[in-house]
Amino acid sequence: RAVKRTIWQRAQGCCEYVDPSTGKRCKDRFGLQLDHLQAHALGGKNTTENLRLFCWTHNTQHAVETFGTKHMQQFISSIHP
């Protein structure tokens, strides 16, 4: 619970995704989710260093980059907020 609170405070209640080509932060405040830098399924820990706050779109994008479109397709259509 303390880790989650710390992440929300650090993110100031908005998506922490930064576009690598523009350097601009998303700042979306809707559909926010905790995202693991190193996926939990691949051994990532639930620590402040390994968690960030992402909107649904950027969390999904990261999951697709990590696990591939084919694997994630089974989840994406059923989990959109």
Image (tube, rainbow, N blue to C red):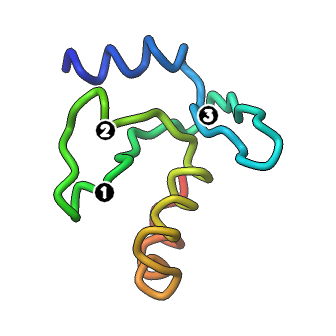
Hey, what amino acid is under mark 2?
Asn
Residue 72 locus on image (x, y percent): 45, 76
Q: Which image quarter holds the N terminus?
A: top left
Labelled disc at residue 50: 2
Label 2 neighbour load within 10 Å: few <14, some 14-19, many 20+: some
Identify residue for label 3. Answer: 30
Foreground mark, 1 or 3, reads 1
Secondary element under disc 2, as helix, strand or loop, is loop
37 relative position to 31: left or right:
left
Secondary element under disc 3, as helix, strand or loop, is loop
Decide which of 78, 44 is in the foreground and name it: 44
5 relative position to 68: left or right:
left
Label 3 neighbour load within 10 Å: few <14, some 14-19, many 20+: few
Label 2 and label 3: CA atoms lie apart by 21 Å
Residue 24 locus on image (x, y percent): 77, 33
Q: Give the residue drawn at x 42%, y 73%.
A: 75
Using the image, determine if residue 81 lies above or below residue 6: below
Using the image, determine if residue 4 lies above or below residue 78: above
Q: Earlier in the sequence, mark 2 or mark 3?
A: 3
Label 2 and label 1: CA atoms lie apart by 9 Å
Q: Give the residue drawn at x 38%, y 21%.
A: 7
Residue 26 locus on image (x, y percent): 71, 35
How many numbered discs?
3
Decide which of 58, 31 is in the foreground and name it: 58
Label 1 neighbour load within 10 Å: few <14, some 14-19, many 20+: some
Label 1 and label 3: CA atoms lie apart by 22 Å
Identify residue for label 1. Answer: 39
**CB under 8 Å between discs 2 and 1:** no
Hey, what amino acid is under mark 3?
Phe
**CB under 8 Å between discs 2 and 3:** no
Hey, what amino acid is under mark 1?
Ala
Q: Earlier in the sequence, mark 2 or mark 1?
A: 1
